[in-house]
Amino acid sequence: MDDGRGAYPGEGLSPARAAVALASVDRSAAAVRRHGRWAARYLLAYAVATTVFLPATGLSTGRWSLLVTVAWIAFVVATGVYARRQSVLRRGARRLYLGATLVWALLWVSAVVVGHSAFSGRPSYWVPAGLAASVPLLLGARLAIRR
Amino acid sequence: MTARHPGPEAQGPHPRHRLDPRIHAPVRLSIVACLAAADKAEFGFVRDAVEVSDSVLSRQMTLLADAGYVRVKKGYVGKRPRTWLSLTPVGRRAFDSHMAALAAIAARAAAPATSDA
């Protein structure tokens, strides 16, 4: 490949060498894509946890309620450590994460407020609420995989 | 009636004039390509992806940062120091323009050398 030291960059750069340069760009982008898949796994983990923890939060009482809170904190800390250890964030992943978690947080808070005021102790409300709140995270994970 | 294809001379200035000298060198192109696909990437990740030494990457990053193409942010994860690299909007525009020029040059392989055989 041309080193760009000619009278102008790319002097003598043939179409074949330009194609080689484009291929090297593709390889670099592929490395980022490979190592950036963690964001999809992260969102997926939160989606699955939501289907468990939101109903558990609404249906548990007394000692069980404390246990659920401790388990939720442990989950948040573990996923936070996992995220901080990653070495690359794919293009657009930050915006995707913020969008998905914003909608998720709104759904979670709404579900808890409505649930505690009108559906206390009713699994027929809390289980579907957990599934519904996980949807933005599942969509975010799907988008993160497809990009 | 024969179809007339415009030769390379009829296609305007050669796209090589749009290549960016600060990106054009192979190592810098790989670095910028890596960062273009990411919101941010850790120094060690870029070093391994581009397959260069710490000192080579550090030298190239200084050149790119001085050109305003790359942002360097230092921080810690626990007690471990980490350096995060990201492309600035100026760097991203320069990379897009450089890629367009490379694609145009590569596409010339299919163009006939003369207008009529």
Image (tube, helix red, strand yellow):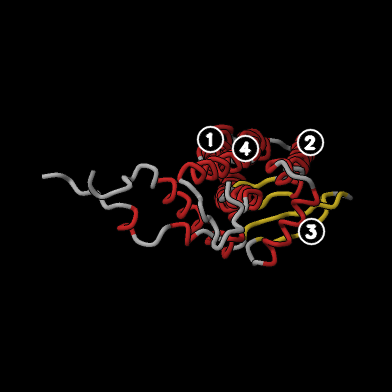
Distance between the Cα atoms at labels 1 and 4? 28 Å
- Image position, residue B57 (x, y; %): 74, 51
- Picture quarter with the N terminus of chain B: top left
Q: Amino acid at mark 2?
A: Leu
Crowding at dot 2, Cα within 10 Å, few <14 / some 14-19 / many 20+, comes out as: some
In contact (CB < 8 Å): disc 1 and disc 4: no
Residue on which the image places disc 1? A128
Is label 4 in a helix, a strand or a loop?
A: loop
Is B93 situated above or below A72? below
Name the chain letter of the residue that bears numbered label 3: B
Residue on which the image places disc 4? A37
Asked if badge 2 and badge 1 are on a common chain, one would say yes
**Of residues A67 and B24, the one drawn nearer to the viewer in this rendering:** B24
Distance between the Cα atoms at labels 2 and 1? 22 Å
Q: Of tags 3 and 2, which is closer to the observer?
A: 3
Residue on which the image places disc 2? A67
Is label 1 in a helix, a strand or a loop?
A: helix
